[in-house]
Amino acid sequence: MAEARRPATIRSVDPAGHLIARRRAFRTRLLGWYRGAGRDLPWRRTRDPYAILVSEVMLQQTQVATVIPYYSEWLRRFPSFARLAAASESDVLHAWQGLGYYARARNLHATAKAVAGTDTGTFPDSVAQMRNLPGLGRYTANAIATFAFGKSVPIVEANIGRLLSRLSNSELPIDSAAGAKLVWNVAGALVPKHDAHTFNSALMDLGAVICGARQPKCGMCPVRQFCRGVDPARLPLKRERAATKMLTEHHRFTIESGQLLLEQSQDRWRGMWILPRLREAPSREKPLYRSEFPFTHHRITLTVYRGVPVSTAPAHSWFPLESLETLPLPSPHRRAVSYLIARDRQNLCSARAAS
Ligand code: SF4
């Protein structure tokens, strides 16, 4: 049956006019490739909106290979909206630790509470209702609509955005309003009425596997004949980023009677436990530990000094060393704590052996 034409959409996405005009042939090539080369990912074996939401939120800013074990463990620990809604923030942050960008975990927790608080306790199937839930933007709502409910809606994440920019040879920065509008319009014009979730998965996989960020494999690309990319490796263009700022932060490592002093963060890692902060580096002391980690537009040097607790703040608490595994600690601080505890134990063993 002939497909209904979409003239208004085609006009508005002119750089991809060639692609949209041949969209049926494009889909055939793409889906043929996907049937043989698509990725078998755990969240593709379910239509449960909760599981799909979890995977989509984890995949924001994080690689697939990193997400897979977290996804399985999260579903084991919090298998439904109701179970997640009933969990404490500390448990939620603990399950998320290592994935970073903890606002995602808080938003997921807030979404679960909102869903559990509705009359039916079920997740809505309309995009408009999903967008009313905390933390659900256009991409996440559309992803759940297509992957859980089979709706014919477009999705644009990093892989699809890059792929569509290259296919259109778009010179608009992908993170600008105009650049984002272009790729969303192209995705909207390409998505089929039926089996949209397969098409969207195929677009995503082609972007991830063939049209990769660093080195597009144009020689083996199934949709090469539709591609207008002139120098595709430099696309998509991005707006100039704010310069990275260097920061040094100082902390105390204090152990007494088998207990470690920790501080509950009120800002960057709100609700998580970190080594107590110092306003400035102690004079005449050498740090025990130093490491670097990135955080948004910052590169932070973490320095840790052995401490003698003169006084403790209200946000400070002592924890037995054996309980640390159950606490939510951000990765840079967990690494520092693990290293320093292991070092203390080793020093103790060496001292005993020498005496
Ligand atoms: S031909 Fe190259 S740039 Fe174009 S879509 Fe395929 S892999 Fe990407």
Image (cartoon, rainbow, N blue to C red):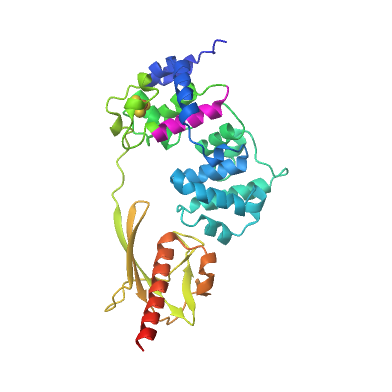
Q: Residue at x 44, y 78 (%)?
A: 255
Q: Count the marks.
A: 0
Which residue is farthest bottom? 355
> From where the camera sits, is residue 170 visible?
no
Which quarter of the rendered picture does the N terminus lie within?
top right
Residue 261 percent coordinates (x, y):
47, 75
Q: Quadrant of residue 351?
A: bottom left
Which residue is farthest right? 119
Please give left or right for residue 72 compared with residue 180 in the image. right
Which stretch did the figure color magenta?
194-209
The correct choice, above or below, for 236 with respect to 308 in the image is above
> From where the camera sits, is residue 291 visible?
yes
Residue 86 percent coordinates (x, y):
65, 56
Residue 202 percent coordinates (x, y):
48, 29
The correct choice, above or below, for 202 with respect to 255 in the image is above
Q: Nearer the viewer, residue 73 or 271?
A: 73
- Is 327 colored magenta in this rendering? no
